[in-house]
Image (cartoon, rainbow, N blue to C red):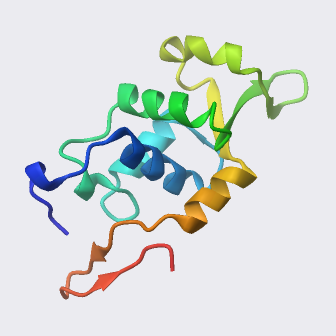
Amino acid sequence: MTVDADDKDTSNSQIEMFVIDVLRYDIEAIPSIIKLLNDPTIGWRNFWPHDFTVSEVIEALRELLPKGLVKPLGYDKSTKELVDIEIENFRDIESSIEAFWFILTEKGWEVWNNWDDPPVEKENGSNYNPKL
């Protein structure tokens, strides 16, 4: 589906929902979130006036974290696992975007399940809901 740039909803709440949507696939770092958002097949690029940027995704995550919709994770070298990290560590994200990973919380899944996402137009002109 192609949407004119003037018709695209670039609100913070819209990008927040797009980020929630791509996080339903897996635990992701910011570069992966951006790659998924900009993917024309599974992402939301066609609903945004330009490629999603690091700063837009960081801002969306900063909004989602205090709402309890996503949880930040960091890599623990001693256990070789992703572990919960304190939100205070998130302030340094611009300098090390690959060091932070994000996962949907139960509340995030509830929001995603109740989201009435924009319909996506198939090549044959029919619409479908990508959540189904």
Which corner quadrant holds the N terminus? Answer: bottom left
Please give the name of the residue rendered at 9% of the width and 57% of the height, measured from the top-left corner.
4
Q: Nearer the viewer, residue 88 or 124?
A: 88
Note whether 47 is above or below 71 in the view shown: below
Residue 123 in view in this figure: yes
Instruction: Tell me residue 111's x, y (percent).
Output: 59, 57
> Which residue is painted at 66% across and 58% down in the image?
109
Residue found at x 33% / y 32%: 53
Q: Position of residue 68 (x, y in %)?
A: 68, 39
Residue ID at (41%, 44%): 13
- Residue 65: image quadrant is top right
Occupied quadrant, residue 67? top right
In the image, residue 71 lies at what x, y percent? Answer: 70, 37
22 vs 73, left or right, is left
Examine the rendered structure and indicate whether residue 87 appears above or below residue 14.
Answer: above
Instruction: Give whichever of 70, 94 is nearer the camera.
Output: 70
Q: In the visual, does 42 lie left or right of 24?
A: left
Residue 25 appears in the rendering = no
52, above or below 37, in the image: above
Q: How many marks?
A: 0
